[in-house]
Structure formats: structure tokens, C-alpha cells
Image (tube, rainbow, N blue to C red):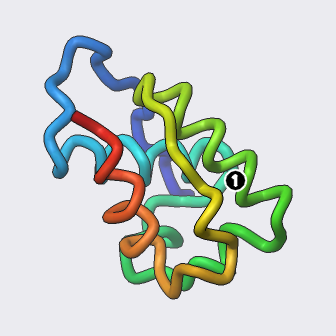
Amino acid sequence: MKKEQNLETSTEQALTIPVVRQRFLLMCQKQYGLWAEEIKEETPFYKVVNDSLDFIELILRCEKEFKISIDETDKDEFSFNTIGEFIDWASLNVG
């Protein structure tokens, strides 16, 4: 039986790029009920985000999690090949 990874993160933790990556992956695991082994940076984006509604929900969750504003007007769910590409793009707004 697989054990669920601890999803608790410190809100006082500095938002460095590695921290953003870790918290984003944990957020996706929690939101979509995926195991750590199932979602990694190289995971195809379409396996997590199936349509524009999923994409908007993901943006909103990132904004809430990281207390940022992400301008998604130039992007859609087809703009990213992997979860890692999305993390890199979203990380540009953290700072």
C-alpha cells in the first residue's frame, strides 16, 4: 500500500524556485489525488490539465498558494508540454 506524502508546507518558507516547484507538485498531488510517483516535472501537462477549466482552476490555486497574480492572457492549456514548463512560467511571477 502506498503512503500519501505529507502535504503540509510552511507558509514562512522563502519562495525560492526549488520551493515553488516542490509546493506546486504537492499542490497538484493533493488537488488531483495523484501519488508522488505519478506527477513529476516531466509529466505531460495534459495528464493533469485536461481542459481550459482545469487550467483556470490551476492558475487560481497557484495565485492563492503563492499569493501572486498570474497573467494567463497569453497562455492556455495547450501552451505547455510538461508540468515543469508550467512551473517555470508560473515561477516568473513569484518574487
What residue lies at 17% left-to-right and 50% top-to-bottom?
A: 18
Q: In the rendered view, would you say 81 is above or below 54? A: below
Q: Using residue 66 as the reference point, say whether residue 16 is left or right of it.
A: left
What residue lies at 59% left-to-right and 67% top-to-bottom?
A: 74
Residue 72, given in percent of the width and then of the height, sits at 60, 56
Q: In the rendered view, would you say 5 is above or below 77? A: above
Q: Quadrant of residue 9?
A: top left
For disc 1, the neighbor class at 10 Å (few under 14, some 14 to 19, many from 20) is few
Depth check: 12 or 1 in front?
12
Q: How many marks?
A: 1
Q: Using residue 86 as the reference point, say whether residue 30 is left or right of it.
A: right
Q: Quadrant of residue 76?
A: bottom right
Q: In the rendered view, would you say 15 is above or below 13? A: below
Residue 77, given in percent of the width and then of the height, sits at 69, 73
Residue 41, given in percent of the width and then of the height, sits at 37, 73
Residue 33, given in percent of the width and then of the height, sits at 68, 52
Question: What is the three-letter code of the residue carrying label 1?
Answer: Tyr
Q: Quadrant of residue 16?
A: top left
Residue farthest toward the front in the current orientation of the protein: 74
Quadrant containing the C terminus is: top left
Q: Using residue 47 as the reference point, say whether residue 35 is left or right of it.
A: left
Q: Which residue is mark 1?
A: 32
What residue lies at 18% left-to-right and 49% top-to-bottom?
A: 17
Quadrant containing the N terminus is: bottom right
Helix, strand or loop at disc 1?
Answer: helix
Q: In the rendered view, would you say 37 is above or below 10? A: below
